[in-house]
Image (spheres, rainbow, N blue to C red):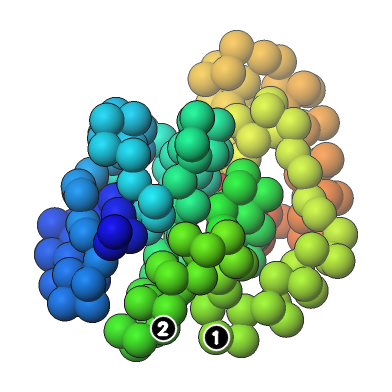
Amino acid sequence: MATRILLVDDHPIVRAGLRAIIETRGFAVVGEASTGEEALEMASELHPDVVLCDLRLGDGMDGVDTTAALRRMPDAPAVVILTTFDHDAQIIRAIEAGAAGYLLKDVDNDTIVAAITDAAAGAMVLTPGGDARVIAALRAPRVTLTDREREVLLVVDEGAGNKQIAARLFISESTVKTHVVHLLEKLGVASRAAAASEARRLGLL
C-alpha cells in the first residue's frame, strides 16, 4: 500500500507543487492543511504515515507546536519539517518536539522522495549537510528565556521604551529595567536593538 502523506503549509502553491512531486512517485497525498489546527483534525481522520509540515503557518499553531501535538496522537505519523527558515534554534526545537528531521525547500525532488521513504521507515531525515549543524547546535549553550522575559522582548522588538513596556505588561518600570538587563546578559549583546536582532537569529522571536 502506498505511503500516505499529509501536506501542511499555509501557501496553496507550495502544497500544489509538493503534491505534484509526491504523487508522480507513487505516494498517496491524503490531505492538505493550511494551519496546525487543520492538520491535527485531518491527521486524526486520515491517519497519514508521514506529515510534511512548514515551520511557519501564519496565526495559530506553528510547525513546532503542530509537530508536538501530532506526535502525541495514537499511531502518530512521522513528521518532516519542510521549510525556508534556516534557523538552527527553530529546527532543534522541532526535532526535540518529535520531528523525524527537516528539509530546506530548495532541495531537489529526489531528496524529498527519499526523505518521505526514510521517515516512514523510522529513520532520521536531515537536509544535505544538516547533520553537522544539528550536532553543533545541540552541543552549543542554549539561551532560555522566561515567559516574562519573552513578553518584554516582544515589546522591545516593537521599539517601545521602558514606560510603554511597563504600561503594556502591567509591571513597574524598575521591573522592566531588570528584565532588559537580564535579556542583554543572556543574549550577549549591548543594546536593546541588538537583543531583538540576536533573538530573531536564534529563533526566539
Looking at the picture, which amino acid does disc 1 mark?
A: Pro
Toward the top, the furthest residue is 170
- Residue 111 seen from this side: yes
Residue placed at 64% from the left, 35% from the top?
150
Count the labels in the image. Answer: 2
**Res 45 quadrant in image:** top left
Relative side of 146 to 46, left or right:
right
User: Is the Cβ of the residue at disc 1 closer than 8 Å to that at disc 2?
Assistant: yes
188 up-or-down from 113: above or below: above
- Measured as percent of width and height from the top left, residue 67 is found at 49, 44
Name the element at disc 2. Answer: helix
Relative side of 189 to 55, left or right:
right
Disc 1 from disc 2: Cα separation = 9 Å
Relative side of 83 to 24, left or right:
right
Between 89 and 195, the one nearer to me in the picture: 89
Between 166 and 44, the one nearer to me in the picture: 44
Q: Which mark is residue 111?
A: 2
Residue placed at 85% from the left, 50% from the top?
185
173 up-or-down from 65: above or below: above
Between 93 and 17, the one nearer to me in the picture: 17
- Measured as percent of width and height from the top left, residue 111 is found at 41, 83
Q: Which mark is residue 128?
A: 1
Looking at the picture, which amino acid does disc 2 mark?
A: Thr
Name the element at disc 1. Answer: loop
- Residue 14 seen from this side: no
90 up-or-down from 135: above or below: above
Relative side of 67 to 116, left or right:
right
Between 146 and 91, the one nearer to me in the picture: 91
Q: Which image quadrant: the N terminus?
A: bottom left
Residue placed at 62% from the left, 44% from the top?
97
- Measured as percent of width and height from the top left, residue 34 is found at 23, 45
